[in-house]
Image: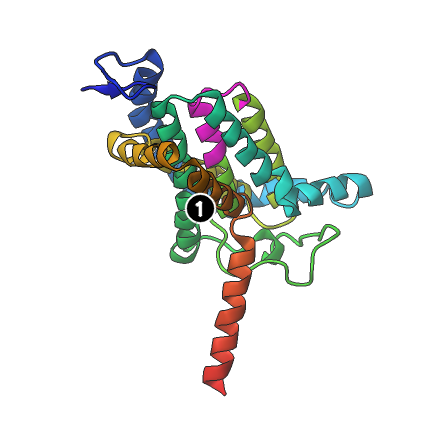
């Protein structure tokens, strides 16, 4: 099959990088499915893994105000998770200007956000466990900075934050960015704060990363990448409109569309009040 080169001319040569990506798609998806299933088994048996590990992590709370505040910063502020990761995605975009790489980067980034939506759906569909914060079996010690009821009360498996941000780290890895190791380490460290603050069990984090891997690697197959080429074509035809949209979408992914979701929830509540009245 013919591949597109940077200049858009057809070539029969497939680069070693593309061959390597293609060869990894199916094995990585299968491994990620196995990891997700293992995490689900752990989630429905919380006393074997989740509760002991969460209790151990929770025992650190309150020993150092500085440490608590640093963890809270990682937990609460998107600068230390999504903003940094999206900055690295943009770096990968400009470091690798060939159409094939940009197409894979584009669909992988959008797939990360889509995986987060799937994660939120699974939280409602799967019967697993409440968040550690609400789990009476743990006697959770609340770190500083949380409100009286800081989280939603439905099941927490898998973590949608971890799904999106792990997906972005995987995209950076696929693009062969020199920042890929830093992105992976940063994501692992920052997202552990979600267990520290009682938002998610370790199995939630593990499942979120596995789900991200499934969706992002599936997006590296031929059909999604072909759609990604439509995006790169738009960038070449109208860069001003493309980068305007890219900035807006990047901001929403980095913050998990928090402001839009807040406005939507406010409008739903207002509509419900009107109907009730």
Residue carrying label 1? 116
177 versus 46 height, above or below:
above
Q: Looking at this rendering, what residue extends furthest in the left direction? A: 1
Write down the region rendered in magenta.
167-179
Please name whichever residue, 101 or 18, is drawn nearer the observer in this view of the structure: 101
Which element carries disc 1, helix, strand or loop? Answer: helix
Position of 271 with respect to 62 (left or right) is left
Residue 33 in the image: x percent, y percent? 35, 35
Res. 64 visible in picture: no
Colour scheme in use: rainbow
Q: Looking at this rendering, what residue extends furthest in the bottom direction? A: 277
- The mark tally for this picture is 1
Any magenta on residue 82?
Answer: no
Which residue is painted at 59% across and 50% down in the image? 199
Please name whichever residue, 14 or 118, is drawn nearer the observer in this view of the structure: 14
Residue 152 in the image: x percent, y percent? 55, 60
What's the magenta bit mostly, secondary-structure-wise?
helix
Which residue is painted at 67% across and 54% down in the image? 139
Res. 209 visible in picture: yes
Position of 259 with respect to 62 (left or right) is left
Q: Quadrant of the N terminus?
A: top left
Residue 138 in the image: x percent, y percent? 63, 52
Crowding near pointer 1: few (<14 within 10 Å), some, many (20+)?
many
Residue 38 in the image: x percent, y percent? 41, 37
Please name whichever residue, 168 or 1, is drawn nearer the observer in this view of the structure: 1
């Amino acid at each position: 099959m013919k591949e597109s080169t940077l200049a858009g001319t057809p070539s029969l040569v497939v680069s070693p990088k593309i061959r390597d990506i293609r060869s990894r798609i199916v094995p990585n998806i299968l491994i990620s499915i196995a990891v997700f299933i293992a995490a689900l088994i752990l989630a429905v048996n919380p006393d074997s893994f989740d509760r002991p590990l969460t209790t151990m992590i929770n025992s650190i709370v309150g020993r150092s105000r500085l440490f608590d505040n640093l963890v809270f910063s990682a937990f609460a502020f998107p600068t230390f998770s999504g903003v940094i990761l999206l900055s690295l995605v943009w770096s990968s975009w400009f470091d690798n200007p060939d159409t094939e790489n940009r197409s894979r980067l584009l669909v992988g980034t959008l797939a990360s956000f889509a995986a987060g939506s799937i994660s939120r759906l699974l939280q409602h569909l799967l019967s697993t466990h409440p968040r550690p914060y609400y789990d009476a079996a743990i006697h959770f010690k609340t770190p500083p900075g949380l409100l009286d009821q800081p989280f939603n009360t439905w099941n927490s498996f898998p973590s949608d934050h971890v799904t999106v941000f792990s997906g972005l780290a995987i995209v950076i890895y696929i693009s062969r960015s020199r920042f890929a190791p830093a992105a992976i380490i940063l994501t692992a460290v920052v997202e552990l704060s979600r267990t520290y603050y009682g938002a998610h069990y370790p199995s939630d984090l593990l499942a979120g990363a596995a789900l991200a891997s499934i969706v992002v690697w599936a997006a590296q197959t031929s059909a999604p990448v072909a759609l990604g080429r439509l995006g790169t074509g738009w960038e070449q035809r109208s860069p001003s409109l493309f980068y305007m949209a890219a900035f807006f979408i990047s901001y929403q992914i980095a913050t998990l569309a928090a402001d839009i979701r807040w406005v939507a929830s406010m409008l739903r509540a207002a509509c419900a009040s009107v109907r009730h009245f």
